[in-house]
Amino acid sequence: MHHRSSCLRGELPLTQAVAIEEISAAKDRLDSLRREISHVYIGPSRTLDLMLTALLAQGHVLLEGVPGVAKTTLVKAYASALGASVRRIQFTPDLLPADITGTYVLSPKDGTFSLRPGPIFANVVLADEINRAPAKTQSALLEAMQERQVTIEGDRFELPAPFMVLATQNPIDLEGTYPLPEAQIDRFLVRVSIGYPTAKDEVAMLRTHNADPPKARAILTVEQLLSLQSIARRVHVDDDLYEYAVGLTSFTRSHAKVLLGASPRATLGLIQAAKSAAVIAGRPFVTPDDVRGVASSVIGHRLVLVPEAEGDTRARDAVVEDAISRVTYRRAVRAV
């Protein structure tokens, strides 16, 4: 066992030397991407960091915020800067699965059927007010998120790569909403909560939009984006950090306020998001702070709380904060 560890240590500098060059180039591209989006979207840098984290990890994002806080503006600027195709789906109670996936239509000229693809066939899909559609319609989106393909009248179609869903829902319970099932909530890598802007940011918005509204330029190509995702997958993670991630999610499963804790998929998502956070920070390896930094956004929305805690909007984040404060990261001592 010690021999294997020393071999890995012997190979690591070469791996790091290659990775550092890639990471440096990746960080430069991500910084340019963030600057371009910031010309259009004025808000907390944390919001953009989480969206870039999900992008690198090939995950989906659940955006929460009251109407009018520029969620749609953010998504459009984000997709434009990525050089990716973007489509918007407004979820309503009468939305049908075919309205998302598409359908076959009959040509009156030659009597043949041809596919009319739905808005799901895009690199970035904005699913607006996702909790306003019934479960059957939500399930069509779930298949796309899970399998990165859709089924139309028995035929399967692959979705374009990269594929990312950015779904919005109002955090306030309103009439005419359908709660997202746990299986669908679990498919979102991160939850991003967008609050009201600061007074300074709101003044900046007014100043910026007083003239022609700015538009984001394409900073990346789809090929460059796929390359960035490949780099994030190859970021190094120590075994100690795998154990730490398991410790954090396991803690939620036995918490007094939690009915259903974070699943193993959440643990996997925690590591994937931490890898992405390392790339954004310009490192070829994950640190405990990377894991802690994304924990609340990756784990919180997946927790099903006991009924008496459901009304507390801070309860989920409090459970994750409790896990971070009580689960200790232990770095293993390795023989040299």
Image: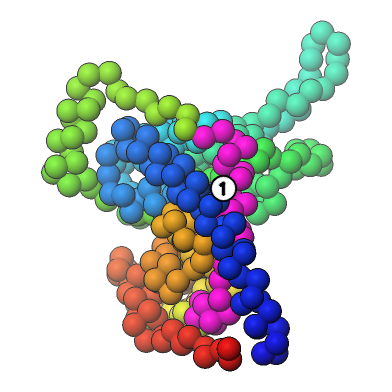
Quarter where residue 224 is shown: top right
Q: Does residue 74 appear anywhere in the picture? A: no
In terms of secondary structure, where does tag 1 sit? helix
Q: Position of residue 266 (x, y in %)?
A: 54, 69
* Res. 137 image quadrant: top right
Q: Residue 79's spot in the image, x, y percent?
A: 48, 35
Segment colored magenta: 220-245
- Could you say which quadrant of the image residue 159 lies in? top right
Magenta segment: does it hold 233?
A: yes
User: Does the rendering let one see residue 154?
Assistant: yes
Residue at the far top: name it: 109
Q: What scheme was used to colour the molecule? A: rainbow
Residue under numbered circle 1:
228
Lateral position of residue 232 relative to residue 49, left or right: right
Neighbours of disc 1 within 10 Å: few (<14), some (14-19), many (20+): many
The stretch drawn in magenta includes residue 254: no
* Front residue of 245 and 264: 245
Does 289 sit left or right of 124 as displayed? left
Amino acid type shown at disc 1: Leu
At 41% from the left edge and 86% from the top edge, which residue is drawn? 328
- Which secondary structure dominates the residues rendered in magenta? helix
Instruction: Say which residue appears at 44% left-offset and 44% top-offset.
Output: 28
